[in-house]
Image: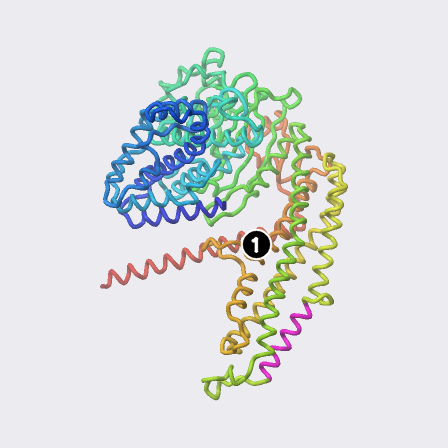
Amino acid sequence: MNVQQLENELWEAADQLRANSKLTAAEYAMPVLGLIFLRHADNRFKAYLPEIEADIPAQVPADQREMLIKLGFQGKAAIYLPEAARFDRIASLPQGNNVGEVIDAAMDVIEAEYEVLKGALPRGYPAFETDLLFDLVKIFDRPAIKAATGDVFGRIYEYFLNKFAMSGAQEGGEFFTPPSLVRMIVNIIEPDHGLVLDPACGSAGMFVQTGHFIEDVRHQQANDTVTFHGQEKSDTNTKLARMNLVVHGLDASNIRQGNTFYDQVEHLVGQCDFVMANPPFNVDGVDTKKVEGQVKPIEQGGRLPFGLPGTNAKTGAISNANSLWVQYFYAYLNDSGRAGFVMASSASDAGNKDRDIREQLVNTGHVDVMMAIGNKFFYTRSLPCTLWFFDKGKPQDLHDQVLMIDARNVYHVVSARSHIFTDEQHANLNAIVWLYRGETDKFVALVAHYQRQVDAWLAAIPGRIAADSAAIEQLAAQLQAFAQGARLTELNASQPDDAQLTQAQLDDFKGELAAAQADTCAEGNTNTAIAALLAACTQARAAITRADLASHSGQRTLQAALDALAPQLRSAGKVLEARHKQWLKLIETADKTLRARNSKAFDGKAVRDGRRALLAADPKKNEDPTVRDAVLDALKQAAYFIHQVHWLHSRFPHGLFEDIPGLCKAVTVEEIAANDYSLTPGRYVGVAAAAAEDEDDFAEKLREIHDELAELNDKAVELAGRIARNFEGLLG
């Protein structure tokens, strides 16, 4: 199943319905998320139902059977759904029924069964237009949706949260932390046991990603290893958090509503194994009198062990709450706890009392990592931020150091207003932390993973090149049949004198066709280049097989050979693209210039199929990859993973941490003190020395600039059209 395609289709369909209604994005968000929750709950219910029913004797009466089914769901990673809440029942309602009342009733019976969801599920579905609601239900009852297994629907739920945030729903999307930042935090603090706290939990994205980490990396069940505690000021977001956790099969019993500034959750002070959060930035107006009692040692339950930040001279209120949050996250940790959180970039360099608080914090030796993040990672606002990491269980030899990472130049462009980290960018930044911590085994394992990926893509190349060549051979046969069988009388039928084709034009086409065929035959330049690549791929795969991928030295030796292969892969891609263009031009000449469709020797369908194989799939139409896409992707992916190892080895050639100008530096407390206790990474890492830009990096940046410019041009055209229409309307 292509989950990304499914997500896009669902969103486009649902958003189109919203556009045709009178609802705002904010009004539409919760009901849609409620339907997704219901659909996913139904899917998980049906996944476990056969197993549970198999243990129930056939002679058991119906009423007792349902009770036994309910009991069978205890301890399962799914919730029991009473018949009234099952999606099939809702989807099968005849047109004209009040489906809104049925959905509301479904939410009622689910909440009656599960106390943790009480008051969390959306209501008010009867307010929807009946036809609109029916259409929404049908969207989420498509066969692909009903067949979704595993965490597919969890992904869809997160995807819709993301899209609603980008649409400006739910208070400007402030509750939603971009997955790239959530994942980076989780990867670095590695929350895999004990109490996990998020005192500004929003929609519980931190907890969901923690669940993914425990299951995917630790291969355990999250509910067996951690206990989540979350607090959120907004009632709406608290409900979203509960729904989000339950839809992922995670315990939501400790999600509570409360203002963390004043609602202290005292029993968790000094008790948490992990704290993670994306609190609201630069909050002012916090009541000083309500928080000054928190200024005391952690051992006495204090959440502000380093004192109060500055206050507003006129109001007496806290002028900026960033330093409150920083202290809260520190105070909740136990003696070996780790914290990771998002903070406004200004917080790492603020002066006056904020500076004094940072001094005390740095002198604890528990500040672990500071990572600068560029702008455009948040969907509803464009601002840089910094990721802070504490570690009270830090090794003694690192107490005097803080790892500074400047990741502002590491990103992937999604759109003109949105950047993310790719999986590999996540891993590579994480690898810097591993080396700093002395976890070289993880670094070696990552490089081995990349080199195995290279092997997998190299293995795919011969078959995909063969398929590409076969498509061209079939196309060549069709065009050859036309060239040999075409008659000028056919081609010129019903054409005026000045549009008559000549034998010379037909002969020119035959010559171009013969030249193209020569390029692709065994003696041709194109085929020679491809043959050389295939031989090189075979040699590289043999080298990978022989290499000791469990050692850094073995990886380095292998990488020398792979680095030499990378230009050949890129060159082969260019050769194939040139070959595709050559044959596409021949098709165009035959069709448009020579009027091939008038000839009985021309098989239009076969030629169209051949043409389609050599064109890129249109992502806007959710088209499946073509033969051309498949072969070029294999070449690009092989080169891409070679580049990932190159990126790591060129910076850390010995497999050990070292300071890299413009990227990372291990900074001593003495250095931080000399810089007035600034924790801004850019102040320490400096600027990378000018060097010849890597071809892959240059190409990626060029693509990003092109895509961003194209998006801005499209928006400009759309805006110009809208202005013109409005102007015409004003003039009547």
**Horizontal and vertical percent for residue 470?**
63, 62
Q: Nearer the viewer, residue 440 or 511?
A: 511
What residue is at 48 percent from the left and 84 percent from the top?
493
Q: Is residue 469 left or right of residue 623?
A: right
Q: Is residue 517 magenta?
A: yes
User: Compared to 615, does 269 lie above or below?
Assistant: above
Q: Is residue 377 left or right of residue 241?
A: right
Q: Is residue 682 magenta?
A: no
Residue that extends furthest to the front in the rendered view of this protein: 59
What residue is at 29 percent from the left and 36 percent from the top?
103
Q: Nearer the viewer, residue 563 or 266?
A: 563
The magenta region covers 504-519
**Horizontal and vertical percent for residue 152?**
47, 39
Identity, as a three-letter code, of the amino acid under mark 1: Leu
What residue is at 76 percent from the left and 40 percent from the top?
547
Q: Main secondary structure of the magenta part?
A: helix
Q: Is residue 86 left or right of residue 271?
A: left
Q: Secondary structure at mark 1?
A: helix
Q: Nearer the viewer, residue 729 or 508?
A: 508
Q: For mark 1, what is the residue?
A: 702
What residue is at 55 percent from the left and 71 percent from the top?
587
**Horizontal and vertical percent for residue 8?**
43, 47
Q: Is residue 311 visible?
A: no
| Quadrant of the image occupied by residue 456 | top right
Q: Is residue 243 left or right of residue 410?
A: left
Q: How is the image coloured?
A: rainbow
Residue that extends furthest to the top in the rendered view of this protein: 300
Q: Residues within 10 Å of mark 1 (few under 14, many from 20)?
A: few
For the C terminus, the image quarter is bottom left
Q: Is residue 433 visible?
A: yes
**Horizontal and vertical percent for residue 167?**
38, 44
